Image (cartoon, helix red, strand yellow):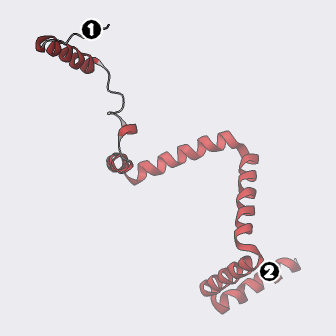
Amino acid sequence: MVTIRKKSVAQRKVIIRKDINSLEKRPRVNSRGFASMSRDKVVAIARKGGLARAEQLGHGGYVELGHKGGEARAGQLGHDGYVAMGRKGGMARAEQLGHDGYVELGHKGGEARSGQLGHHGYVEMGRKSRKSSVT
């Protein structure tokens, strides 16, 4: 036969204090850092940091950062890398637009250029091209 002893109130208080002390010593894993925050809170903090950085740098600072990044990327890719990237972008755009899309794009470009040059501008362009083809 098994006998069960009840613990006294004093013994129970000691056990509870030990449990509380052991909880306080444990590191809090899930209650700190960006991982425990909601996405909205992280975005708000990032926005504040971005605005502070923008005040420090200003437009010229961002232009300079962009140039440095572009130079670094150009060093990584080289000419052939840029050629491949441009070809890939062109193929993706062609897939989006299709033949009719390119036709429409050409018409819009022609209308814009016509608005810039006008009739006399086109006449002058024609004269220049005839002179260069004759010589």
Mark whose residue sits in front, 2 or 1: 1
- Residue type marked 2: Ser
Q: Is residue 131 visible?
A: yes
**Residue type indicated by callout 1:** Thr
In this rendering, is residue 53 above or below 4? Answer: below
Residue found at the far front of this picture: 1
Q: Crowding at label 1, few (<14), some or many (≥20) Cα neighbours within 10 Å?
A: few
Q: Do the residues labelled 2 and 1 touch (CB within 8 Å)?
A: no
Q: Name the residue under label 2.
A: 129
Task: Give left or right: position of 133 versus 15.
Answer: right
* Residue pointed to by mark 1: 3
Instruction: Quadrant for residue 29, please give it.
Output: top left
Q: Position of residue 80 (x, y in %)?
A: 76, 47
Compared to 85, does 115 lie above or below? below
Query: Extreme bottom residue here?
Result: 119
Eyeballing the image, is 83 above or below 21? below
Q: Which of 5 and 88 is in front in this view?
A: 5
Residue located 82% across and 77% down the image: 132
The residue under the point 74% across, 67% down is 95
As rendered, which of 99 and 2 lies closer to the eye?
Answer: 2
Quadrant into which the N terminus falls: top left
Q: Residues within 10 Å of mark 2 (few under 14, many from 20)?
A: few
Q: Position of residue 59 (x, y in %)?
A: 40, 54
Query: Extreme right residue here?
Result: 134
